[in-house]
Image (cartoon, helix red, strand yellow):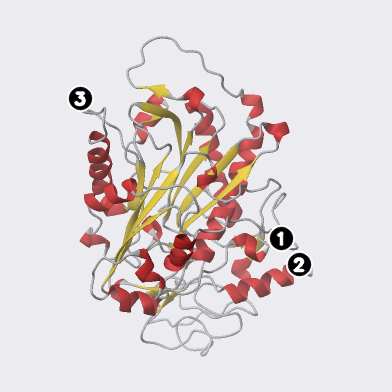
Amino acid sequence: MLCLIGAAMGLAGVGFAQDAPSGARAPLSGAQAATAGAQDPPSGAQAAAAADGQATTAGAQAATFAAPRPRARDLGLAPGRYEPGPLNAITDVEGVLVGHVTRIEGESIRTGVTAIRPHGGNLFAEKVPGGVFVGNAFGKLAGSTQVQELGTIEAPIVLTNTLNVAEGLAGGIEWTLAQPGNERVRSVNVVVGETNDGALNDIRGRHVTMADVKAAIEGAAGGSVAEGNVGAGTGTVAFGWKGGMGTASRRLPAAAGGYTLGVLVQANYGGSLYLGGREYFQYLPPGGRRGGMAGKVKGGAGRPGERSSAGGTADALPDAPGMVAHAPGMVAHAPGTIPDAPGTADGSCMIVVATDAPLDGRSLERLAARAVFGLARTGSAYSNGSGDYAIAFSTARAVRVAHGQDVPASRTLLPADALSPLFEAALEATEEAVYNALLQAADMKGAGGREIRALPVAEVKAWIARQRGR
């Protein structure tokens, strides 16, 4: 099944809202509503719908996919003090477009590509200021050195899996060269980020194609952004639970400039999950139910959140040979599968930050850093094997750079002393985008018969109710 989805589908300052705010996501149009469920395929439906490997339209998928799962604010998780934009998405920043191509085929292809266009025009001819921050460089962020050197972004940003970075580059280059006005272009810098989705995807098969990348770019749109098991987040895992794509936004008050900031994350990293600044990982470890049945384990092998087709349940035999007991109220685990065990925090997280504030490359690098810092609020371990990167850009027309411009130009930029509210907004939106990625994801079965469970909504609701009562 090949799915093309445009964006039009569906601690201090951290805590729980008493009532989930309304209007966090704008109503979808009739056509959009018919396809909004496409981001949340249950594992059984995925296998049935994907078996023939044929391309299907989003409308046809809606009949087989489960009802949409909640976003963070639907459950009262509302990090920080700033309000979100009307969509609570990166597309709240005017002009930003997002597109996904999702590949769910047979029993082992669980991957995709996501494209972000800072504006709908010719990016090469009208470049936007950009900055990159590297939290941990165990990754392949292609095109980043030119952004660091020149402070501009001149092509769509592409996210995919680790072994398809080359196709991301090829697709982005081909699409850019084909744009009217670029007939004489002989060098173009495409930024391609990645995370490793090999836990669920046959990553060695390198199934994302150049055509997929071009389709994601071409299909990018404004409006609500599909989250969870879509695009570059199709096969990702976060904190041992099913990861995915997630987004959120913040709108600064007029006194702070009234600017909008949006974040998009490709969540595929680990650590110990915190929700609203509290230790959710101690309440319900990945792969199990609190005081109930854990995910099945096989000979002590596997990853948090993983279920195998063989073996017993971890907490059914807490004293069985080879099993490791945990704290009261938590399930037992096979060795090497507890959430904070060595090797279980590896992965990666790609973050894209957009704002309409007039910033230059240096300020955007600083803003990108705050997005990476925001992962700490969710419990990121920033482990040795986790490639943690953020790319930030400004859509403000006053700071765009025309290709070939070689004469002085005056620009109005925010000074450093005015950046702190944007930094705070980046922290908040990144945290919430990760929550949305986890909550919008659905159980997925993939390569090798491995199944990764999604964060259980009922358990999260019960846990939040307990936190409010404290």
Determine whether, in the image, residue 193 is placed left or right of residue 264.
Answer: left
User: Quick one: 273 or 167, which is closer to the camera?
Assistant: 167
The quarter of the displayed image where residue 310 is located: bottom left
User: Quick one: 383 or 175, which is closer to the camera?
Assistant: 175
- If you read the primary sequence from the N terminus, does the residue marked by circle 1 or circle 2 appear first? 1
**In which quadrant will I find the N terminus?**
bottom left
Q: Which residue is mark 2?
A: 468
Residue 340 at least partly seen? no
Q: Which residue is mark 1?
A: 16
Q: Amino acid at mark 2?
A: Arg
Determine whether, in the image, residue 403 is placed left or right of residue 22.
Answer: left
Q: Amino acid at mark 3?
A: Arg
Determine whether, in the image, residue 437 is placed left or right of residue 330.
Answer: left
> 10 Å neighbourhood of mark 1: few (<14), some, or many (≥20)?
many
Cα distance, mark 1 to mark 3? 54 Å
Name the residue: 49% across, 76% down: 287
| Element class at badge 2 | helix
Q: Are marks 1 and 2 in contact (CB under 8 Å)?
A: yes
Name the residue: 26% across, 42% down: 169
Cα distance, mark 1 to mark 2? 7 Å
- If you read the primary sequence from the N terminus, does the residue marked by circle 1 or circle 3 appear first? 1
User: Quick one: 207 or 88, which is closer to the camera?
Assistant: 88
Q: Tell us which disc is closer to us: 1 or 3.
A: 3
Name the residue: 33% across, 26% down: 125
Relative to 431, say whether 46 is above or below: below
Estimate the x, y position of residue 219 in percent, counting from the top left: 34, 50
Q: Amino acid at mark 1?
A: Phe
- If you read the primary sequence from the N terminus, does the residue marked by circle 3 or circle 2 appear first? 3
Q: Which mark is residue 184?
A: 3
Name the residue: 40% across, 75% down: 63
| Element class at badge 1 | loop
